[in-house]
Image (tube, rainbow, N blue to C red):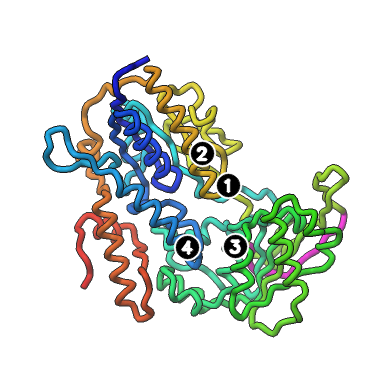
Amino acid sequence: MSSSPLALRVAIVGAGPAGIYAGNLLANAVAERGGRVEIDLFESLPAPYGLIRYGVAPDHPRIKGIVNSLHEMLDAFPDAGDDGEAERRTIRFLGNVEVGRDIALAELRERCHAVILATGAIRDAALDIPGVNLAGSYGAADFVAWFDGHPDVARTWPLDAREVAVIGNGNVALDVARVLAKHAVDLRSTEVPDTVLAGLEASAVTDVHVFGRRGPADIKFTPIELRELGEVRDVDIVLHDEDFDGVDPASASSNQLKVMLRTLNSWRDRPAGTASRRLHLHFWHAPVSIEGDGRVESIRFARTRTDAEGALVITDEVREYPVQAVYRAVGYYGTRVNGAPFDEVRGVVPNEAGRVDAEPGLYATGWIKRGPVGLIGHTKSDALETITHLVADAEAGLLSAPDAETDVLELLEERGTAYTTWDGWLALDAHERHLGETHEHTRERVKVVPREEQVAVSRDGALVR
Protein backbone atom coordinates (compact mmCIF):
# COMPACT_ATOMS: atom_id res chain seq x y z
CA MET A 1 0.00 0.00 0.00
CA SER A 2 1.36 3.39 -1.05
CA SER A 3 1.95 5.97 1.68
CA SER A 4 2.81 8.87 -0.65
CA PRO A 5 0.11 11.30 -1.83
CA LEU A 6 -1.93 10.07 -4.74
CA ALA A 7 -0.95 11.31 -8.20
CA LEU A 8 -3.46 10.03 -10.72
CA ARG A 9 -4.46 10.50 -14.33
CA VAL A 10 -8.01 9.32 -15.02
CA ALA A 11 -10.25 9.35 -18.09
CA ILE A 12 -14.04 9.52 -17.79
CA VAL A 13 -16.09 8.54 -20.84
CA GLY A 14 -19.36 10.50 -20.86
CA ALA A 15 -20.03 14.07 -19.69
CA GLY A 16 -23.60 13.69 -18.49
CA PRO A 17 -24.49 13.88 -14.79
CA ALA A 18 -22.89 10.49 -14.05
CA GLY A 19 -19.53 11.47 -15.53
CA ILE A 20 -19.54 14.98 -14.05
CA TYR A 21 -20.46 13.73 -10.58
CA ALA A 22 -17.71 11.12 -10.80
CA GLY A 23 -15.10 13.72 -11.81
CA ASN A 24 -16.19 16.12 -9.09
CA LEU A 25 -16.13 13.45 -6.39
CA LEU A 26 -12.77 12.09 -7.54
CA ALA A 27 -11.15 15.54 -7.62
CA ASN A 28 -12.42 16.28 -4.12
CA ALA A 29 -11.43 12.87 -2.72
CA VAL A 30 -7.86 13.13 -4.02
CA ALA A 31 -7.51 16.76 -2.87
CA GLU A 32 -8.66 15.79 0.63
CA ARG A 33 -5.77 13.30 0.74
CA GLY A 34 -3.24 15.91 -0.32
CA GLY A 35 -2.81 14.35 -3.75
CA ARG A 36 -3.28 15.42 -7.34
CA VAL A 37 -5.49 14.09 -10.11
CA GLU A 38 -5.76 15.07 -13.75
CA ILE A 39 -9.06 14.07 -15.33
CA ASP A 40 -9.97 13.99 -19.01
CA LEU A 41 -13.76 14.06 -19.42
CA PHE A 42 -14.70 12.78 -22.89
CA GLU A 43 -18.05 13.45 -24.56
CA SER A 44 -19.19 12.30 -28.00
CA LEU A 45 -21.29 15.46 -28.40
CA PRO A 46 -19.72 18.94 -28.70
CA ALA A 47 -21.45 20.14 -25.50
CA PRO A 48 -21.59 18.67 -21.99
CA TYR A 49 -24.51 17.53 -19.76
CA GLY A 50 -25.75 14.51 -21.73
CA LEU A 51 -29.40 13.68 -21.11
CA ILE A 52 -29.90 16.88 -19.12
CA ARG A 53 -29.34 18.81 -22.35
CA TYR A 54 -30.75 16.25 -24.79
CA GLY A 55 -33.05 13.91 -22.88
CA VAL A 56 -35.40 16.00 -20.73
CA ALA A 57 -38.34 18.09 -21.86
CA PRO A 58 -37.35 21.79 -22.12
CA ASP A 59 -40.34 23.03 -20.10
CA HIS A 60 -39.02 21.69 -16.79
CA PRO A 61 -37.93 24.73 -14.74
CA ARG A 62 -35.83 22.64 -12.38
CA ILE A 63 -33.53 21.56 -15.23
CA LYS A 64 -31.93 25.02 -15.16
CA GLY A 65 -30.85 24.43 -11.57
CA ILE A 66 -29.36 21.03 -12.41
CA VAL A 67 -27.41 22.46 -15.36
CA ASN A 68 -26.12 25.30 -13.17
CA SER A 69 -24.97 22.78 -10.57
CA LEU A 70 -23.16 20.65 -13.16
CA HIS A 71 -21.60 23.78 -14.66
CA GLU A 72 -20.23 24.80 -11.27
CA MET A 73 -18.72 21.35 -10.78
CA LEU A 74 -16.84 21.48 -14.07
CA ASP A 75 -15.82 25.10 -13.59
CA ALA A 76 -14.54 24.65 -10.04
CA PHE A 77 -11.21 22.90 -10.50
CA PRO A 78 -8.48 25.06 -12.05
CA ASP A 79 -5.12 24.08 -10.65
CA ALA A 80 -1.85 26.03 -10.91
CA GLY A 81 0.93 24.19 -12.70
CA ASP A 82 4.01 23.06 -10.80
CA ASP A 83 6.04 25.79 -12.46
CA GLY A 84 3.63 28.48 -11.26
CA GLU A 85 2.81 29.55 -14.81
CA ALA A 86 -0.51 29.36 -16.65
CA GLU A 87 -3.35 27.57 -14.95
CA ARG A 88 -4.34 24.14 -16.15
CA ARG A 89 -7.49 22.32 -15.26
CA THR A 90 -7.85 19.34 -12.97
CA ILE A 91 -10.89 18.35 -15.08
CA ARG A 92 -10.32 18.80 -18.82
CA PHE A 93 -13.47 18.60 -20.95
CA LEU A 94 -12.95 17.11 -24.43
CA GLY A 95 -16.15 17.18 -26.49
CA ASN A 96 -16.97 15.91 -29.98
CA VAL A 97 -14.77 12.88 -29.27
CA GLU A 98 -16.23 9.38 -29.41
CA VAL A 99 -14.17 6.88 -27.46
CA GLY A 100 -13.97 3.72 -29.54
CA ARG A 101 -13.96 5.69 -32.78
CA ASP A 102 -11.81 8.83 -32.52
CA ILE A 103 -9.62 7.30 -29.85
CA ALA A 104 -9.52 3.71 -28.68
CA LEU A 105 -10.36 2.70 -25.12
CA ALA A 106 -7.03 0.85 -25.06
CA GLU A 107 -5.22 4.11 -25.90
CA LEU A 108 -6.83 5.78 -22.88
CA ARG A 109 -5.91 2.90 -20.62
CA GLU A 110 -2.30 3.14 -21.78
CA ARG A 111 -2.24 6.78 -20.69
CA CYS A 112 -4.25 6.61 -17.46
CA HIS A 113 -4.24 4.91 -14.10
CA ALA A 114 -7.97 4.33 -14.50
CA VAL A 115 -10.85 4.82 -16.92
CA ILE A 116 -14.45 5.34 -15.79
CA LEU A 117 -17.26 4.50 -18.21
CA ALA A 118 -20.25 6.84 -17.79
CA THR A 119 -21.87 6.58 -21.22
CA GLY A 120 -25.40 6.23 -19.90
CA ALA A 121 -28.26 5.01 -22.09
CA ILE A 122 -29.68 6.90 -25.07
CA ARG A 123 -31.36 4.15 -27.12
CA ASP A 124 -34.89 2.89 -26.60
CA ALA A 125 -35.33 -0.51 -25.03
CA ALA A 126 -37.00 -3.02 -27.35
CA LEU A 127 -40.74 -3.74 -27.24
CA ASP A 128 -41.28 -7.16 -28.77
CA ILE A 129 -44.85 -7.10 -30.08
CA PRO A 130 -46.28 -7.53 -33.61
CA GLY A 131 -46.48 -4.33 -35.62
CA VAL A 132 -43.81 -2.48 -33.64
CA ASN A 133 -41.97 -1.57 -36.85
CA LEU A 134 -44.97 -0.11 -38.67
CA ALA A 135 -44.69 3.45 -39.96
CA GLY A 136 -45.91 5.71 -37.19
CA SER A 137 -44.38 3.61 -34.40
CA TYR A 138 -41.60 5.55 -32.68
CA GLY A 139 -39.15 5.17 -29.86
CA ALA A 140 -39.65 7.82 -27.18
CA ALA A 141 -35.91 8.45 -26.97
CA ASP A 142 -35.85 9.49 -30.63
CA PHE A 143 -38.77 11.88 -30.16
CA VAL A 144 -37.18 13.40 -27.05
CA ALA A 145 -33.90 13.84 -28.94
CA TRP A 146 -35.81 15.64 -31.70
CA PHE A 147 -37.62 18.13 -29.48
CA ASP A 148 -34.41 18.71 -27.50
CA GLY A 149 -32.45 19.58 -30.64
CA HIS A 150 -30.01 16.66 -30.62
CA PRO A 151 -27.52 17.23 -33.45
CA ASP A 152 -27.63 13.66 -34.74
CA VAL A 153 -31.37 13.27 -35.40
CA ALA A 154 -33.59 14.55 -38.19
CA ARG A 155 -34.70 18.20 -38.05
CA THR A 156 -38.33 17.32 -38.78
CA TRP A 157 -40.84 15.01 -37.12
CA PRO A 158 -44.16 13.73 -38.52
CA LEU A 159 -46.98 15.07 -36.33
CA ASP A 160 -49.92 14.27 -38.60
CA ALA A 161 -51.67 11.85 -36.20
CA ARG A 162 -54.80 13.04 -34.40
CA GLU A 163 -54.89 10.19 -31.87
CA VAL A 164 -51.64 9.03 -30.31
CA ALA A 165 -50.69 6.21 -27.91
CA VAL A 166 -47.78 6.51 -25.46
CA ILE A 167 -46.77 3.20 -23.89
CA GLY A 168 -45.17 3.56 -20.46
CA ASN A 169 -45.81 4.78 -16.95
CA GLY A 170 -42.61 6.66 -16.15
CA ASN A 171 -41.40 10.25 -16.38
CA VAL A 172 -40.29 9.88 -20.01
CA ALA A 173 -43.79 8.77 -20.98
CA LEU A 174 -45.20 11.85 -19.26
CA ASP A 175 -42.66 14.13 -20.97
CA VAL A 176 -43.59 12.73 -24.37
CA ALA A 177 -47.33 12.94 -23.66
CA ARG A 178 -47.12 16.48 -22.30
CA VAL A 179 -45.12 17.81 -25.26
CA LEU A 180 -47.48 16.11 -27.72
CA ALA A 181 -50.56 17.55 -25.98
CA LYS A 182 -49.17 20.99 -25.20
CA HIS A 183 -49.80 23.94 -27.50
CA ALA A 184 -46.58 25.12 -29.18
CA VAL A 185 -47.19 28.71 -28.12
CA ASP A 186 -46.69 27.61 -24.51
CA LEU A 187 -43.19 26.34 -25.34
CA ARG A 188 -41.97 29.58 -26.93
CA SER A 189 -40.27 30.74 -23.73
CA THR A 190 -38.14 27.58 -23.54
CA GLU A 191 -34.92 26.72 -25.39
CA VAL A 192 -36.76 24.45 -27.81
CA PRO A 193 -35.35 24.97 -31.35
CA ASP A 194 -37.40 26.96 -33.85
CA THR A 195 -37.67 23.93 -36.16
CA VAL A 196 -39.32 22.02 -33.32
CA LEU A 197 -41.69 24.89 -32.57
CA ALA A 198 -42.70 24.98 -36.23
CA GLY A 199 -43.36 21.26 -36.19
CA LEU A 200 -45.43 21.42 -33.01
CA GLU A 201 -47.42 24.40 -34.29
CA ALA A 202 -48.49 22.30 -37.29
CA SER A 203 -49.34 19.26 -35.13
CA ALA A 204 -52.69 17.54 -35.76
CA VAL A 205 -52.82 15.93 -32.29
CA THR A 206 -56.11 16.14 -30.41
CA ASP A 207 -55.94 13.10 -28.11
CA VAL A 208 -52.95 11.53 -26.38
CA HIS A 209 -53.46 8.19 -24.60
CA VAL A 210 -50.90 7.04 -22.00
CA PHE A 211 -50.98 3.33 -21.15
CA GLY A 212 -49.45 1.57 -18.14
CA ARG A 213 -49.23 -2.18 -17.50
CA ARG A 214 -50.02 -1.83 -13.82
CA GLY A 215 -52.41 0.24 -11.76
CA PRO A 216 -52.31 3.75 -10.29
CA ALA A 217 -50.56 2.49 -7.14
CA ASP A 218 -47.57 1.35 -9.23
CA ILE A 219 -46.88 4.47 -11.30
CA LYS A 220 -43.23 5.41 -11.78
CA PHE A 221 -43.79 9.14 -12.15
CA THR A 222 -42.55 11.72 -9.68
CA PRO A 223 -45.02 14.14 -8.03
CA ILE A 224 -43.62 17.20 -9.82
CA GLU A 225 -43.97 15.51 -13.22
CA LEU A 226 -47.55 14.57 -12.49
CA ARG A 227 -48.42 18.03 -11.18
CA GLU A 228 -46.97 19.66 -14.31
CA LEU A 229 -49.25 17.47 -16.38
CA GLY A 230 -52.33 18.91 -14.73
CA GLU A 231 -51.18 22.48 -15.34
CA VAL A 232 -51.03 22.26 -19.13
CA ARG A 233 -53.29 24.91 -20.66
CA ASP A 234 -56.28 23.91 -22.78
CA VAL A 235 -55.75 20.18 -22.18
CA ASP A 236 -58.26 18.05 -20.28
CA ILE A 237 -57.03 15.07 -18.24
CA VAL A 238 -59.27 12.03 -18.74
CA LEU A 239 -59.26 9.15 -16.22
CA HIS A 240 -61.39 6.02 -15.96
CA ASP A 241 -63.04 5.04 -12.68
CA GLU A 242 -62.66 1.30 -13.33
CA ASP A 243 -58.87 1.69 -13.16
CA PHE A 244 -59.12 2.91 -9.56
CA ASP A 245 -61.19 0.09 -8.05
CA GLY A 246 -59.61 -0.85 -4.72
CA VAL A 247 -57.00 1.92 -4.88
CA ASP A 248 -56.76 3.73 -1.53
CA PRO A 249 -54.31 6.66 -1.23
CA ALA A 250 -54.21 6.15 2.55
CA SER A 251 -52.57 2.74 2.08
CA ALA A 252 -49.94 3.99 -0.38
CA SER A 253 -46.44 2.59 0.09
CA SER A 254 -44.80 6.05 0.31
CA ASN A 255 -45.70 9.67 0.93
CA GLN A 256 -44.79 10.48 -2.68
CA LEU A 257 -47.21 7.88 -3.98
CA LYS A 258 -49.88 9.09 -1.57
CA VAL A 259 -49.53 12.61 -2.99
CA MET A 260 -49.76 11.35 -6.57
CA LEU A 261 -52.83 9.21 -5.90
CA ARG A 262 -54.54 12.19 -4.33
CA THR A 263 -53.64 14.23 -7.41
CA LEU A 264 -55.12 11.60 -9.72
CA ASN A 265 -58.27 11.38 -7.61
CA SER A 266 -58.68 15.16 -7.72
CA TRP A 267 -58.61 14.98 -11.53
CA ARG A 268 -61.30 12.29 -11.48
CA ASP A 269 -63.54 14.73 -9.64
CA ARG A 270 -63.17 17.45 -12.26
CA PRO A 271 -66.24 18.15 -14.40
CA ALA A 272 -66.03 17.18 -18.07
CA GLY A 273 -63.89 19.75 -19.81
CA THR A 274 -64.14 21.61 -23.09
CA ALA A 275 -60.45 21.87 -23.93
CA SER A 276 -59.30 21.49 -27.53
CA ARG A 277 -56.98 18.61 -26.59
CA ARG A 278 -57.27 15.67 -24.22
CA LEU A 279 -54.72 13.56 -22.38
CA HIS A 280 -56.08 10.15 -21.36
CA LEU A 281 -54.39 8.11 -18.62
CA HIS A 282 -55.09 4.36 -18.85
CA PHE A 283 -53.95 1.76 -16.33
CA TRP A 284 -53.99 -2.06 -16.32
CA HIS A 285 -53.13 -2.27 -20.04
CA ALA A 286 -50.42 -4.58 -21.43
CA PRO A 287 -49.59 -3.98 -25.13
CA VAL A 288 -50.44 -6.94 -27.39
CA SER A 289 -49.96 -5.63 -30.93
CA ILE A 290 -49.88 -2.56 -33.13
CA GLU A 291 -52.27 -2.92 -36.03
CA GLY A 292 -52.30 -1.37 -39.48
CA ASP A 293 -51.79 -1.89 -43.21
CA GLY A 294 -48.31 -0.48 -43.71
CA ARG A 295 -48.71 2.15 -41.00
CA VAL A 296 -50.24 2.45 -37.54
CA GLU A 297 -54.05 2.39 -37.47
CA SER A 298 -54.79 1.05 -33.97
CA ILE A 299 -53.23 -0.59 -30.94
CA ARG A 300 -54.44 -3.59 -28.95
CA PHE A 301 -54.01 -4.20 -25.23
CA ALA A 302 -54.83 -6.99 -22.81
CA ARG A 303 -56.35 -5.87 -19.53
CA THR A 304 -54.25 -6.82 -16.53
CA ARG A 305 -54.67 -7.24 -12.79
CA THR A 306 -52.55 -8.41 -9.87
CA ASP A 307 -52.92 -11.65 -7.94
CA ALA A 308 -52.85 -12.09 -4.16
CA GLU A 309 -49.02 -11.91 -4.17
CA GLY A 310 -48.95 -8.74 -6.26
CA ALA A 311 -47.77 -10.45 -9.46
CA LEU A 312 -49.11 -9.08 -12.74
CA VAL A 313 -51.71 -11.26 -14.44
CA ILE A 314 -52.65 -10.89 -18.12
CA THR A 315 -56.38 -11.45 -18.58
CA ASP A 316 -58.27 -12.60 -21.68
CA GLU A 317 -59.97 -9.22 -22.10
CA VAL A 318 -58.53 -7.37 -25.10
CA ARG A 319 -59.25 -3.75 -25.99
CA GLU A 320 -58.38 -1.91 -29.19
CA TYR A 321 -57.92 1.83 -29.58
CA PRO A 322 -57.85 3.76 -32.87
CA VAL A 323 -54.55 5.67 -33.05
CA GLN A 324 -52.36 6.82 -35.91
CA ALA A 325 -49.06 6.92 -34.00
CA VAL A 326 -47.46 5.01 -31.14
CA TYR A 327 -44.60 6.20 -28.91
CA ARG A 328 -42.77 3.52 -26.95
CA ALA A 329 -41.51 4.82 -23.60
CA VAL A 330 -40.66 1.46 -22.05
CA GLY A 331 -37.11 2.27 -20.98
CA TYR A 332 -33.61 2.87 -22.31
CA TYR A 333 -30.78 0.60 -23.37
CA GLY A 334 -27.15 1.21 -22.43
CA THR A 335 -24.58 2.77 -24.76
CA ARG A 336 -21.64 0.44 -25.18
CA VAL A 337 -18.03 1.49 -25.69
CA ASN A 338 -15.97 -0.45 -28.23
CA GLY A 339 -13.33 -2.43 -26.38
CA ALA A 340 -15.22 -2.65 -23.07
CA PRO A 341 -17.15 -5.67 -21.79
CA PHE A 342 -20.90 -5.41 -22.35
CA ASP A 343 -23.92 -7.40 -21.21
CA GLU A 344 -26.15 -7.53 -24.31
CA VAL A 345 -29.20 -8.66 -22.35
CA ARG A 346 -29.14 -6.04 -19.59
CA GLY A 347 -27.49 -3.29 -21.63
CA VAL A 348 -24.83 -2.58 -18.98
CA VAL A 349 -21.11 -3.02 -18.40
CA PRO A 350 -20.77 -6.07 -16.12
CA ASN A 351 -19.37 -4.82 -12.82
CA GLU A 352 -19.27 -5.29 -9.09
CA ALA A 353 -20.15 -2.05 -7.31
CA GLY A 354 -18.46 -0.07 -10.09
CA ARG A 355 -15.39 -2.26 -10.66
CA VAL A 356 -15.69 -3.73 -14.17
CA ASP A 357 -15.43 -7.51 -14.11
CA ALA A 358 -11.93 -8.87 -14.80
CA GLU A 359 -10.66 -5.45 -15.93
CA PRO A 360 -8.45 -3.85 -13.22
CA GLY A 361 -8.38 -0.08 -13.64
CA LEU A 362 -11.69 0.02 -15.52
CA TYR A 363 -14.78 1.32 -13.71
CA ALA A 364 -18.40 2.19 -14.47
CA THR A 365 -20.95 4.58 -13.05
CA GLY A 366 -24.48 5.74 -13.82
CA TRP A 367 -26.94 3.94 -16.06
CA ILE A 368 -24.22 1.99 -17.89
CA LYS A 369 -23.33 0.56 -14.47
CA ARG A 370 -26.74 -0.24 -12.99
CA GLY A 371 -29.23 0.05 -15.83
CA PRO A 372 -31.52 2.96 -16.80
CA VAL A 373 -33.36 3.42 -13.51
CA GLY A 374 -33.33 6.12 -10.86
CA LEU A 375 -33.17 9.89 -10.77
CA ILE A 376 -30.32 12.41 -10.53
CA GLY A 377 -29.89 11.79 -6.79
CA HIS A 378 -29.30 8.10 -7.45
CA THR A 379 -26.63 9.01 -10.02
CA LYS A 380 -24.69 10.98 -7.42
CA SER A 381 -24.73 8.22 -4.81
CA ASP A 382 -23.86 5.73 -7.53
CA ALA A 383 -20.81 7.78 -8.52
CA LEU A 384 -19.73 7.97 -4.88
CA GLU A 385 -19.67 4.18 -4.65
CA THR A 386 -17.53 3.88 -7.78
CA ILE A 387 -15.11 6.64 -6.78
CA THR A 388 -14.73 5.21 -3.27
CA HIS A 389 -13.58 1.92 -4.78
CA LEU A 390 -11.30 3.61 -7.32
CA VAL A 391 -9.54 5.63 -4.61
CA ALA A 392 -9.26 2.55 -2.39
CA ASP A 393 -7.66 0.63 -5.27
CA ALA A 394 -5.24 3.50 -5.90
CA GLU A 395 -4.24 3.67 -2.23
CA ALA A 396 -3.73 -0.10 -2.21
CA GLY A 397 -1.37 0.17 -5.20
CA LEU A 398 -3.68 -1.83 -7.47
CA LEU A 399 -3.72 0.64 -10.36
CA SER A 400 -1.02 0.30 -13.00
CA ALA A 401 0.97 3.40 -13.90
CA PRO A 402 0.46 4.76 -17.44
CA ASP A 403 2.90 3.24 -19.95
CA ALA A 404 2.39 5.79 -22.75
CA GLU A 405 3.39 9.44 -22.39
CA THR A 406 1.81 10.95 -25.49
CA ASP A 407 -1.00 13.27 -24.45
CA VAL A 408 -4.40 12.44 -25.89
CA LEU A 409 -4.60 15.92 -27.43
CA GLU A 410 -1.61 15.08 -29.61
CA LEU A 411 -3.36 11.94 -30.84
CA LEU A 412 -6.58 13.82 -31.57
CA GLU A 413 -4.76 16.60 -33.40
CA GLU A 414 -2.74 14.11 -35.46
CA ARG A 415 -6.03 12.48 -36.49
CA GLY A 416 -7.72 15.76 -37.35
CA THR A 417 -10.40 15.33 -34.68
CA ALA A 418 -12.21 18.64 -34.14
CA TYR A 419 -12.46 18.31 -30.37
CA THR A 420 -14.12 20.97 -28.23
CA THR A 421 -13.00 22.23 -24.82
CA TRP A 422 -14.49 23.80 -21.71
CA ASP A 423 -13.63 27.28 -23.02
CA GLY A 424 -15.35 26.24 -26.24
CA TRP A 425 -18.48 25.29 -24.30
CA LEU A 426 -18.44 28.68 -22.56
CA ALA A 427 -18.34 30.30 -26.01
CA LEU A 428 -21.21 28.14 -27.28
CA ASP A 429 -23.19 28.81 -24.11
CA ALA A 430 -22.73 32.57 -24.54
CA HIS A 431 -23.64 32.28 -28.23
CA GLU A 432 -26.90 30.46 -27.45
CA ARG A 433 -27.80 32.99 -24.77
CA HIS A 434 -27.19 35.81 -27.23
CA LEU A 435 -29.48 34.11 -29.76
CA GLY A 436 -32.12 33.93 -27.04
CA GLU A 437 -31.81 37.62 -26.17
CA THR A 438 -32.22 38.65 -29.82
CA HIS A 439 -34.97 36.17 -30.70
CA GLU A 440 -38.41 37.52 -31.61
CA HIS A 441 -39.73 35.69 -28.54
CA THR A 442 -37.08 36.55 -25.94
CA ARG A 443 -35.72 33.42 -24.28
CA GLU A 444 -32.90 32.47 -21.96
CA ARG A 445 -31.21 30.71 -24.89
CA VAL A 446 -31.84 29.28 -28.33
CA LYS A 447 -30.08 25.97 -28.67
CA VAL A 448 -27.75 25.52 -31.64
CA VAL A 449 -28.70 22.22 -33.30
CA PRO A 450 -26.28 21.30 -36.15
CA ARG A 451 -23.16 19.54 -34.87
CA GLU A 452 -20.88 21.36 -37.29
CA GLU A 453 -22.23 24.72 -36.12
CA GLN A 454 -21.74 23.81 -32.46
CA VAL A 455 -18.16 22.77 -33.19
CA ALA A 456 -17.45 25.91 -35.22
CA VAL A 457 -18.72 28.23 -32.48
CA SER A 458 -16.91 26.24 -29.77
CA ARG A 459 -13.60 26.25 -31.61
CA ASP A 460 -13.78 29.82 -32.97
CA GLY A 461 -15.33 31.40 -29.88
CA ALA A 462 -17.17 33.86 -32.09
CA LEU A 463 -20.59 35.31 -31.32
CA VAL A 464 -23.11 36.16 -34.00
CA ARG A 465 -23.86 39.87 -33.60
In the image, 393 versus 407, the foreground residue is 393
Q: Which residues are magenta?
A: 316-326
Marks 2 and 4 sit apart, C-alpha to C-alpha, by 29 Å
Mark 2 touches mark 1? (CB < 8 Å): yes
Q: Which residue is mark 3?
A: 225
The amino acid pointed to by label 2 is Asp
Q: Earlier in the sequence, mark 2 or mark 4?
A: 4
Residue at (63%, 77%) from the top-left corner? 235
Please indicate, yes or no, whether residue 119 appears anywhere in the rendered image. yes
The label on residue 382 is: 2
Q: In terms of secondary structure, where does tag 2 sit?
A: helix
What is the x, y in percent for residue 123? 52, 49
- Looking at the magenta stretch, what is its main secondary structure? strand
Label 3 Cα neighbours within 10 Å, binned few <14 / some 14-19 / many ≥20: some
Distance between mark 3 and mark 2 Cα atoms:
23 Å
Kindly identify which residue carries mark 1.
Answer: 374
* Left-right relation of 236 to 285: left
